[in-house]
Image (tube, rainbow, N blue to C red):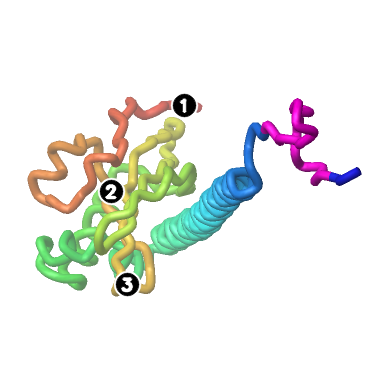
Amino acid sequence: METYPVYWPQFLHCHDGEIECLERFNLAERFGQSNIFYSRKISKMKYLITSLSLLLIYTSLLSQTLYADSASQSNALKQGTLMAKLLLKKDYRSFTAFTYAPIIKMAGGLDKMASYMEESFKGMEDEGFSIANVTVENCSKIIHLEKQLQCTLTEIVELKHTDGKLIQKSTLIGIYSDKGVTWTFIDTHGATLKKLQETIKELSNDLVVPEQQEPEIISN
């Protein structure tokens, strides 16, 4: 008896003794469908691998950005704190050097602005006030602009007086230029972001400058 390939799914004995195969799929069709199946499977695998690679790249870039932002926030806080210490030491020139350069230029230069700062604090002392402490905290998220990084920080100034003390919170805007080596700052002095942008147009709309609160007065 003749044997027939096992891949023939159905067969029928005819009257003349011949065996006629009734195939659902002939050999060529079966291999053709297999090739299509594997081709689709490989394409799907390539798609998944590509998608995974893109996801890994995105995750890596995001991690690097978050790490860089964390470092930038830390540096902004450190340099803001250094600026505060210079004020406590009454080193007005070094303190003024941390001011955003366009502000210094508008004030007539570093020396002139430092002299103005010294006179202002001397007048405050003549009225019986002295600076007891200055702290800088709460750095916001880092805002990325084309040539700058920007953020906001909270500055807390504590003034002493014979009658008690006064604590004033205000907002600093920190700016880091791509050509700079340090953060520089703008003391908002209670001005709104919109008002500040009239003079300093490069300030980002994403900066959050809250309304300045009334100072806390603690009597002796």
Q: Which mark is residue 218?
A: 1
- Considering only order in the chain, which callout, 3 or 2, is on the residue closer to the N terminus? 3
Q: Mark 3 points at which residue?
A: 180
Q: Is residue 129 visible?
A: yes
Where residue 163 sits: x, y (%)? 43, 31
Please tell me which residue lies in front, 12 or 80: 12
Please tell me which residue lies in front, 172 or 203: 203
Point out the stretch of residues depicted in magenta: 4-22
Q: Reply yes or no: does residue 20 show up in magenta.
A: yes
Where residue 56 sits: x, y (%)? 56, 54
Q: Name the residue under label 2.
A: 187
Considering only vertical position in the picture, is 215 above or below 117? above
Q: How crowded is mark 2: few (under 14 residues within 10 Å), some or many (20 or more)?
A: some
Q: Residue at x 40, y 48 (%)?
A: 130
Where residue 109 sits: x, y (%)? 14, 70
Nearer to us of marks 2 and 1 is 2
- Considering only order in the chain, which callout, 1 or 2, is on the residue closer to the N terminus? 2
Q: What residue type is labelled 1?
A: Ile
Considering only vertical position in the picture, is 10 above or below 63? above
Q: Residue at x 32, y 72 (%)?
A: 180
- C-beta proximity under 8 Å, tags 1 and 3: no
Q: Is residue 59 visible?
A: no
For this view, does 182 lie left or right of residue 52? left
- Tag 1's secondary structure? strand
Q: What residue type is labelled 3?
A: Gly
Q: Is the magenta stretch mostly helix, strand or loop?
A: loop
- Considering only order in the chain, which callout, 3 or 1, is on the residue closer to the N terminus? 3
